[in-house]
Image: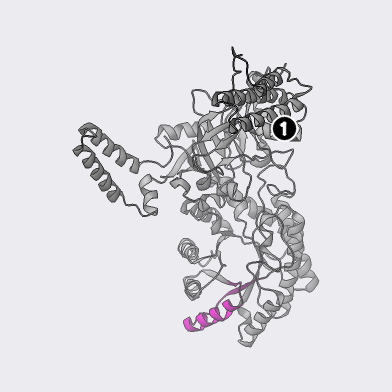
């Protein structure tokens, strides 16, 4: 007999270790995330299990304080630990290989420009002189204000991106405040613009150049390098810049070589090929007389979203120490070979630093699945196509379920065709479709006991799945999920000591078919189409979205006018943890103002309509006042559901 998922005989034998394996939490979450004995996700912000925060208890506490879901949880201690680990990896590599230079990293602020994130990062980066990389004028304004250089603390300020004269002059003037601002030339015309501004301000510039490497990146961002890359200079253009600077007695201004071959580089081989090429360019520039002190390897240090530790887009086949070792060793070899000084190594590892510190928690509002009931036998003679569907249902077995599925599909299509031609009534069509879904349900139960599922039944597996409706907007909170099909870890944050005996997808609140999660991480394959979840009961069911601190927090849009979520910053304390700060999410009023609807104007229009309806006796005084109060309260309320 087929066993229903909700009646699994070993349901109560499930353990938290089973959940750890199912959701692969030790793969993508180590050392920050685990499951405690209560079956709740536990966060260890410093990577030490004994200093943990129970996510479920934290969410319940926040709700009791009136903080609504969805809510973004930020853990600055994780951010600090990520930055510390990156610096320690480079320190170990430098010591291991006897490298004569040093490492001084920067955070590419585009990953997440939110002030609490930047402040926490700069605070944690103080011991390492950790700086910022910017790519626009607004980002430059943030960096100049937030970086506070002193005589013994000079973090780098790397100025990338397209530049106009305002951008360049601001960067030059920042050097007068003590900032170590390096203007990176990415287009040939930027050199003349920079030298002209420098001469007008009488400020000698510190310049960098971005090389367009032949070494090709991989994955979605592989086009960041190569001949058709958006940014960067070819070797002939670099040589021309060197000559121009020499002619203007300014070759000493060229202090940095930068390259970037893409984000989320899953293969260490690609990273090694790029650093080999770049280190040779660096050495040759030094031999040409350039005053290059820094080699900026850009971004690319990947995050293992799936926990598979493989060369696939959602993972990587190396760790942070491998990354640092290969960069340090390769640059040392090139410098030794060419007999040039070792540069200060710079990386822009935003994703690897920022991803782990943010978790979005949302609640499930409801669920729906297909649970058809078999139509009773009629007193009259049914149409042949309906009788065929009844017989198909009766004869479904483990041995023939694939064949009978095709039969059921054929008979359903015949019924729809007959209805369109006028040979079946609407009631007949309803009976036929009900019988078809009964066949699918019976086959679905058998499939769950099968060793493998035939390819042509994969759609049925998807169609019979439960849909869980989540209180979030994918377009606002995790845009890369729908825009580029990036995978993120998704799992319940509680009930993990119980078997999740449903398989489903998660739909968001938007009126858009793309607003759903239907691809999930899987250690055995690149991804799976259904997620194991628990049946809903009379208590809240909370889902966590993990590793979303880079890009997602800043790139969201207001589809259907769902706004920013509430955000809470959680810090460890001697007694446990505390809510460091809370940022209120968008109200309806906030969002409407972004599309040019003013609170007072809308309210006046509603009052005018209410007065008109009252004059026509369509609404009484109590209803009118209640409508106005309700409308105004909605304007002041959260854009998500209560």
Q: Which residue is identified by label 1?
A: 457
Asked whether residue 478 appears in the rendered view, the answer is yes
Residue sitting at 56 percent across and 81 percent down? Answer: 192
- Count of marks, rendered view: 1
286 or 241: nearer the viewer? 241
487 or 576: nearer the viewer? 487
Q: Position of residue 246 (x, y in %)?
A: 65, 85
Chain part drawn in magenta: 184-210
> On the image, which quarter does residue 621 sit in?
top left
Mark 1 Cα-neighbour bin, 10 Å: few <14, some 14–19, many ≥20 = some
> On the image, which quarter does residue 258 sit in?
bottom right
Is residue 201 magenta-colored?
Answer: yes
Q: Helix, strand or loop at disc 1?
A: helix
> On the image, which quarter does residue 413 sit in?
top right
Residue sitting at 56 percent across and 55 percent down? Answer: 111
Q: Position of residue 74 (x, y in %)?
A: 51, 44
354 or 600: nearer the viewer? 600
Q: Position of residue 263 (x, y in %)?
A: 65, 56
Asked whether residue 51 appears in the rendered view, the answer is no
Determine the residue located farthest toward the front in the rendered image: 422
Q: Quadrant of the N terminus?
A: top right
């Amino acid at each position: 007999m087929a066993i229903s998922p909700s009646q699994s005989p070993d349901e109560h034998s499930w353990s938290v270790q089973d959940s750890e394996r199912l959701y692969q939490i030790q793969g993508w979450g180590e050392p920050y995330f685990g499951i405690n004995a209560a079956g709740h996700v536990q966060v260890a912000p410093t990577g030490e299990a004994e200093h943990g925060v129970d996510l479920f208890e934290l969410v319940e506490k926040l709700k009791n304080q009136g903080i609504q879901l969805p809510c973004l949880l930020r853990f600055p201690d994780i951010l600090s630990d990520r930055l510390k680990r990156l610096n320690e990896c480079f320190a170990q590599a430098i010591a291991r290989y006897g490298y004569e230079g040093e490492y001084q990293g920067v955070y590419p602020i585009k990953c997440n420009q939110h002030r609490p994130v930047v402040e926490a990062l700069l605070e944690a980066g103080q011991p390492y002189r950790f700086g910022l990389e910017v790519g626009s004028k607004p980002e430059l304004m943030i960096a100049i204000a937030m970086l506070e250089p002193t005589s013994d603390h000079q973090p780098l300020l790397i100025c990338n991106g397209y530049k106009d004269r305002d951008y360049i002059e601001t960067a030059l003037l920042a050097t007068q405040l003590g900032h170590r601002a390096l203007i990176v030339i990415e287009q040939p015309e930027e050199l003349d613009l920079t030298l002209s501004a420098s001469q007008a301000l009488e400020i000698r510039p510190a310049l960098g150049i971005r090389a367009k490497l032949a070494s090709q990146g991989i994955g979605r961002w592989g086009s960041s390098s190569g001949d058709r890359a958006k940014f960067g200079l070819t070797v002939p253009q670099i040589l021309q810049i060197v000559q121009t600077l020499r002619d203007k007695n300014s070759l000493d201004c060229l202090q940095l070589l930068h390259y970037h071959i893409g984000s989320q580089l899953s293969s260490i081989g690609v990273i090694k090929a790029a650093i080999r090429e770049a280190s040779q360019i660096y050495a040759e520039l030094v031999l040409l007389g350039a005053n290059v002190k820094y080699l900026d390897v850009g971004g690319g240090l990947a995050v293992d979203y799936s926990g598979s530790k493989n060369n696939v887009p959602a993972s990587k086949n190396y760790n942070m120490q491998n990354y640092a070792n290969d960069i340090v060793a390769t640059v040392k070899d090139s410098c030794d070979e060419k007999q040039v000084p070792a540069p200060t190594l710079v990386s822009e590892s935003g994703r690897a630093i920022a991803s782990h510190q943010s978790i979005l928690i949302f609640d499930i509002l409801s669920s729906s699945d297909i649970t058809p009931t078999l139509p009773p036998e009629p007193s009259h003679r049914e149409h042949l196509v309906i009788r065929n569907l009844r017989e198909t249902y009766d004869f479904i077995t483990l041995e023939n379920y694939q064949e009978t599925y095709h039969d059921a599909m054929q008979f359903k299509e015949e019924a729809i065709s007959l209805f369109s031609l006028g040979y079946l009534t609407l009631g007949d069509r309803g009976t036929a479709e009900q019988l078809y879904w009964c066949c699918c349900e019976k086959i679905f139960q058998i499939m769950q006991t099968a060793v493998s599922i035939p390819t042509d039944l994969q759609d049925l597996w998807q169609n019979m799945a439960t849909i869980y409706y989540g209180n979030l907007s994918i377009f606002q909170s995790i845009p890369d999920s729908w825009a580029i099909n990036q995978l993120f870890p998704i799992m319940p944050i509680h009930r993990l000591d119980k078997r999740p005996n449903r398989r489903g997808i998660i739909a968001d609140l938007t009126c858009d078919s793309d607003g759903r999660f239907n691809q999930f991480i899987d250690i055995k394959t690149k991804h799976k189409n259904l997620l194991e979840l628990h049946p809903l009961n009379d208590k809240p069911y909370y889902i966590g979205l993990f590793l979303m601190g880079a890009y997602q927090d800043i790139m969201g849009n207001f589809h259907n006018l769902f706004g920013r979520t509430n955000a809470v910053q959680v810090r460890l304390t001697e007694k446990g943890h505390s809510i460091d700060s809370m940022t209120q999410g968008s109200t309806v009023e906030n969002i409407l103002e972004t599309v040019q609807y003013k609170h007072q104007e809308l309210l006046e229009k509603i009052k005018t309509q209410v007065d008109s309806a009252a004059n026509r006796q369509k609404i009484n005084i109590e209803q009118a006042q209640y409508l106005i109060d309700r409308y105004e309260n909605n304007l002041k309320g959260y854009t998500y559901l209560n």
